[in-house]
Image (spheres, helix red, strand yellow):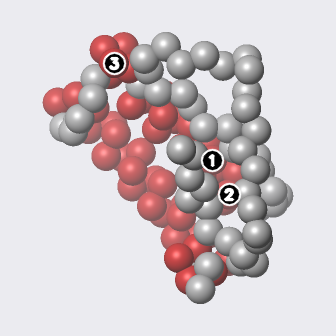
Amino acid sequence: MLVDLTPKVEKGDAIIFLPDTTITYNGVQIENKRKLLTSDINVKTFIGLQEEKFRRLNQGDLATKYGKLGIDDLGVEFIDLEHRMLAVYSKIVKRFGDHRTLAT
């Protein structure tokens, strides 16, 4: 089952997921494909930070580790990454609003 978690301003009748025949699941997470739909520098930065987060969460032995990860797994640099993401997200919310209120 595929579930679209993207908040919607306008509700549609259907959502289409397109298969990607170039990707094969081999037991490790697959990076999301993100498409920038605005020229806003904060959105671009946030997407870059999301990609960095994915790389860090899936580097080395972490690629096949399941369950909760702690500071020993991720390092203190990961906390800095999370703080940078939160700061950029706050700027996005100020400009565009909170996504949780857009779908109501």
The x and y percentages for residue 30 are 54, 27
Eyeballing the image, is 25 above or below 19?
Answer: above
Examine the rendered structure and indicate whether residue 97 appears above or below residue 14: below
Quadrant assignment for the C terminus: bottom right
Q: Secondary structure at mark 1?
A: helix
Marker disc for residue 77? none
Q: Are marks 2 and 1 in contact (CB under 8 Å)?
A: yes
- Local packing at callout 2 (Cα closer than 10 Å; few below 14, some 14-19, many 20+) is some
How far apart in space, not on screen, are marks 3 and 2 (Cα)? Answer: 29 Å
The 10 Å Cα crowd at callout 3, few under 14, some 14 to 19, many 20 or more, is few
Q: Is residue 21 above or below residue 66?
A: above
Task: Measure the C-alpha gap from mark 1 to mark 3.
Answer: 24 Å
Which quadrant of the view contains residue 19? top right
Q: Is residue 10 left or right of residue 52?
A: right
Q: Which residue is mark 3?
A: 64
Helix, strand or loop at mark 3 = helix
Residue on which disc 2 sits: 43
> Secondary structure beneath disc 2?
helix
Amino acid of disc 2:
Val
Which three-letter amino acid code belongs to the residue tagged 3?
A: Thr
- Distance between mark 2 and mark 1 Cα atoms: 6 Å
> Which residue is rendered at x = 73% and y = 57% of the image?
15
Q: Residue at x 75, y 62 (%)?
A: 14
The numbered mark at residue 47 is 1
Instruction: Choose top left, top right, bottom left or bottom right for residue 28.
Output: top left
**Nearest the camera: 40 or 21?**
21
Query: In this rendering, which labeled residue sits more in front, label 1 or label 3?
Result: 3
- Viewer-closest of 9 and 74: 9
